């Protein structure tokens, strides 16, 4: 078996290595190296101009980029929300359903919004529908009913 001929570094060697490293760092510190800082050098106006220029060049070249999936999903959600059909429901019955069956979405089934009712029912174990139904109740309470006691939700 061959013996390891390298000697373990002595404590004095480590100290001298640290001193050399420290001197090298000080020498580098004297050099003026420019490192940009994001907080100071970042300008959103320049970024917006560059983005606009990029879109103009892409339009000139005929490059069409498809929107990201989350943008399309958000657009679809807001389009459905704006074009949603509102239903006429009895105000008193709706308020009582919010309070008594809100945890399972009973008031959402009553107003014929079955998808939301299913979501309320599935989330019932978490307790979130309680908060949602309180918000629904707070929306319905100040609404003025028509002559038949109905509101448009």
Image (spheres, rainbow, N blue to C red):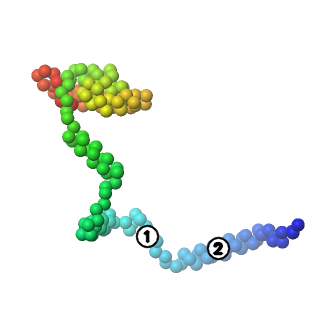
Q: Position of residue 74 (x, y in %)?
A: 30, 47
Circle nearer the N terminus (1, 2): 2
Look at the numbered disc 2 and give the secondary structure of its residue.
Answer: helix
> Is the N terminus in the top left, top right, bottom left or bottom right quadrant?
bottom right
User: Which residue is at the far left?
Assistant: 147
Disc 2: CA contacts within 10 A as few (<14), some (14-19) or many (>=20): few
The disc at residue 36 is 1
| Front label number (1 vs 2) | 1
Location of mark 2 (residue):
21
Residue 61 found in image quarter:
bottom left
Q: Where is residue 31 in the image (x, y as percent from the top left)?
A: 52, 79
Q: In this view, does 2 lie to the left or right of 123?
A: right
Can you see residue 98? no
Residue at 29% across, 26% down: 109
Q: Where is residue 67 in the image (x, y as percent from the top left)?
A: 31, 55
Look at the numbered disc 1 and give the secondary structure of its residue.
Answer: loop
Would you place residue 101 above or below residue 139 in this image? above
Residue 145 found in image quarter:
top left
Would you place residue 143 above or below residue 78 in this image? above
> Is the C terminus in the top left, top right, bottom left or bottom right quadrant?
top left
Residue at 36% across, 32% down: 119
Q: Distance between the residues labelled 1 and 2?
A: 25 Å
Give the camera-side residue of 126 and 59.
59
Can you see residue 18? yes
Q: In this view, does 112 lie to the left or right of 128?
A: left
Residue at 20% across, 35% down: 85
């Amino acid at each position: 078996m061959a013996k390891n001929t390298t000697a373990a570094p002595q404590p004095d060697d480590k100290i001298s290595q640290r001193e050399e490293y420290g001197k090298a760092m000080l020498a580098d510190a004297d050099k003026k190296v420019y490192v940009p800082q994001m907080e100071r050098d970042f300008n959103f106006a320049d970024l917006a101009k560059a983005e606009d220029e990029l879109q103009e060049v892409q339009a000139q070249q005929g490059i069409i980029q498809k929107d990201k999936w989350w943008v399309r999903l958000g657009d679809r959600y807001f389009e459905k929300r704006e074009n949603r059909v509102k239903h006429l429901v009895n105000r008193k019955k709706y308020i009582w359903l919010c309070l008594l069956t809100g945890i399972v979405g009973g008031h959402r089934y009553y107003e014929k919004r079955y998808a939301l009712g299913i979501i309320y029912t599935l989330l019932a174990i978490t307790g979130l529908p309680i908060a949602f139904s309180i918000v629904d109740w707070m929306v319905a309470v100040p609404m003025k009913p028509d002559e038949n006691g109905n509101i448009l939700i």
